Image (cartoon, rainbow, N blue to C red):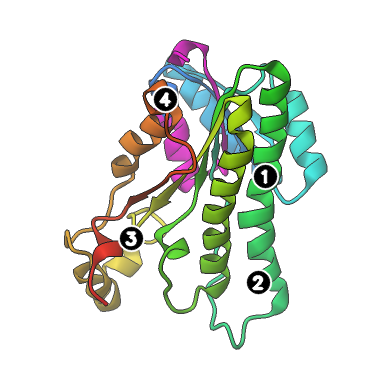
Amino acid sequence: MTASQTVVLVTGASSGLGAHFAKVLARDGHHVVLAARREDRIDALANEIVASGGSAEAVRMDVTDPASVDAAFSAMSRPVDAVVNNAGTSQPAAAIEQPLEEFEEVIDTNLTGVFTVARTAARQMRNRGAGGAIVNIASILGLRVAGQVAAYSASKAAVIHMTKALALEWARYGIRVNALCPGYVETPLNSEFFATAAGQALVRRIPQRRLGQLSDLDAPLRLLLSDEASYMTGSVVAVDGGHLVSSL
């Protein structure tokens, strides 16, 4: 698949990693489908990409609602060749106090939503007979835990294992499924925390002694979506400055 021929769906594209991924892929020449609940934001981002010479469209999608996912796929101007399954939520809280509703919300978005989008895309890819690539955005917290994020950690661990299971099942259709696991990456939403004493203490625990930048995720994402990774499926790629191999 060359970039000019590839349609890439990015979920959770209204902000953060999703918006960044969409811009990167559009600059690479892909046609990007921006999906999220906040229509005003994805419409604005699609217009920005097109004004910059890229190719993009926006579709409203609530990954927790299968009917919304189906409607979004039906509304797309072209079938998808690849998916960046990025939509997610966190809801940090002490596990012993966290309301069950919050735990269920995290699982519904981060796990069931990822499965719903992946399955819908895979059915379309299988029926076309052209194969495809799915990259599920997990986290190093799916491989190692931290306090106050039990629901998030559990959901991302499940995404990693589900990625491997889907890769096994869907290889016969030429569909590759891999997981990208970011470590601590600086964004506008967390920059204030990382400027605090607690945030700086966390940074000192990263072997490279720095936060990741959004751009650090670009090359790994490009690899997993590209034909250069045609023999990679069921892989889990951590981008974390060595955090996972640091001592306890």
User: Closer to the camera: disc 4 or disc 1?
Assistant: 4
Reading the chain from its start, which is encountered first: label 2 or label 3? 2
Q: Amino acid at mark 3?
A: Ser
Magenta extent: 1-24
Q: Please, what is the three-letter code of the amino acid marked with disc 4?
A: Ser
- What residue is shown at x 72% (from left), y 35% (from top)? 120
Sequence-wise, the earlier of marks 1 and 3 is 1
In the rendered view of the protein, which quadrant contains the C terminus? bottom left
Q: Position of residue 11 (x, y in %)?
A: 59, 40
Q: How far across and how far down the image is residue 132, in percent?
A: 56, 25
Q: Which residue is mark 1?
A: 37
Reading the image, the residue beneath label 3 is: 191
Q: Are marks 1 and 3 in contact (CB under 8 Å)?
A: no
Task: Indicate which label's residue lies in the foreground, 1 or 2.
Answer: 2
Q: CA distance from mark 1 to mark 2?
A: 20 Å
Q: Magenta segment: does it hold 104? A: no
CB within 8 Å, label 4 to label 1: no
Marks 1,2: beta carbons within 8 A: no
- CA gap, disc 2 and disc 3: 25 Å
**Extreme residue in the bottom direction:** 96
Q: Report which residue position mark 4 lands on.
A: 226
Q: Position of residue 168 (x, y in %)?
A: 58, 41
In space, the residues marked 4 and 3 are separated at their CA atoms by 31 Å
